[in-house]
Amino acid sequence: MLLGTTLIFLAALLYSSVGHAGASGYLAVMALLGMAPAEMRPTALLLNLVVATIGSRAFIGAGHFRWSLLWPLVVTSVPMAYLGGRLALPVTVYRGVVGVVLVLSAIRFLVTLRAPDEPRGEPPRPVALLVGALLGLLAGLTGVGGGIFLSPLLLLMGWATLRTTAATSVVFILANSAAGLLGQLGTLDALPDTLWPWAGAALAGGSIGSWLGARRLPGPALRALLAAVLLLAGVKLVLT
């Protein structure tokens, strides 16, 4: 109980500082503790909802959110996240490929820690709609909110600044976690007894991390933290 709660707190703290909710971290903790797969996806999504709600308030309140960037992504991602939550597909190959992509993205950020934080403009509307659909489906299939895939894409394509990326990702995660969880309502009876202390740990860690990310951490620090998050998530996906 103590080990799991501590790790959940640390995952929420680290991930929320860059506009993520921590689902891949929670899945790693649960895998470490030997939990059954049936428990892992709904638990990760519920913890995601806690942290993403806090993060959305923090980053929106700090003035970093742009609705024009988010809505084309969300309008297609939410129904696809629901669909992904309803499906039970083998994801071994998917996890390996996406894990490698995340690791390479992390290396890219580490190489350019002090690169200019100047976006080139928002994506064309059809591209944003397609990206949202694909990321929503992946989010629902894997039990994550999708921000772990959206953040590097927004930054590497030059579609948003670091903090706008964090704000967009955390609201994107909130919407898709809710949709993915709706697709798994039949699995909620499998939730573990540790859910409430874990939710409290996620609430505490997410509150601290979101505040730091939205108002205190400088650009290079945010980029380094994002690289660390991507690296951890990528290694976790490759190894599992």
Image: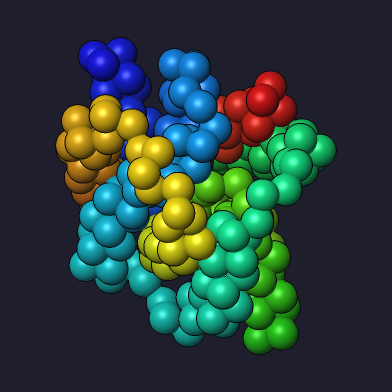
> Is residue 199 left or right of 157 when viewed as pictured?
left
Q: For the C terminus, which image quadrant?
A: top right
Task: Tell me: residue 102, above or below residue 239.
Answer: below
Residue at left offset 71%, top offset 85%? 126
Residue at left offset 26%, top offset 43%? 206
Q: Position of residue 144 (x, y in %)?
A: 52, 48
> Is residue 52 left or right of 103 when viewed as pictured?
left
**Res 121 visible:** no
Along the line of sight, the residue nearer the viewer: 180 or 28: 180
**Res 60 visible:** yes
Q: Position of residue 172 (x, y in %)?
A: 46, 65
Along the line of sight, the residue nearer the viewer: 10 or 47: 47
Task: Tell me: residue 171, above or below residue 186.
Answer: below
Q: Quadrant of residue 138?
A: bottom right
Residue at left offset 56%, top offset 57%? 85
Task: Tell me: residue 69, above or below residue 162.
Answer: below
Q: Position of residue 182 (x, y in %)?
A: 44, 63
Task: Tell me: residue 232, above or below residue 212.
Answer: above
Q: Quadrant of residue 80?
A: bottom right
Q: Position of residue 205 (x, y in %)?
A: 24, 36
Q: How many marks?
A: 0
Residue at left offset 36%, top offset 38%? 191
> Is residue 207 left or right of 125 when viewed as pictured?
left
Q: For the N terminus, which image quadrant?
A: top left
Q: What's the colour scheme?
A: rainbow
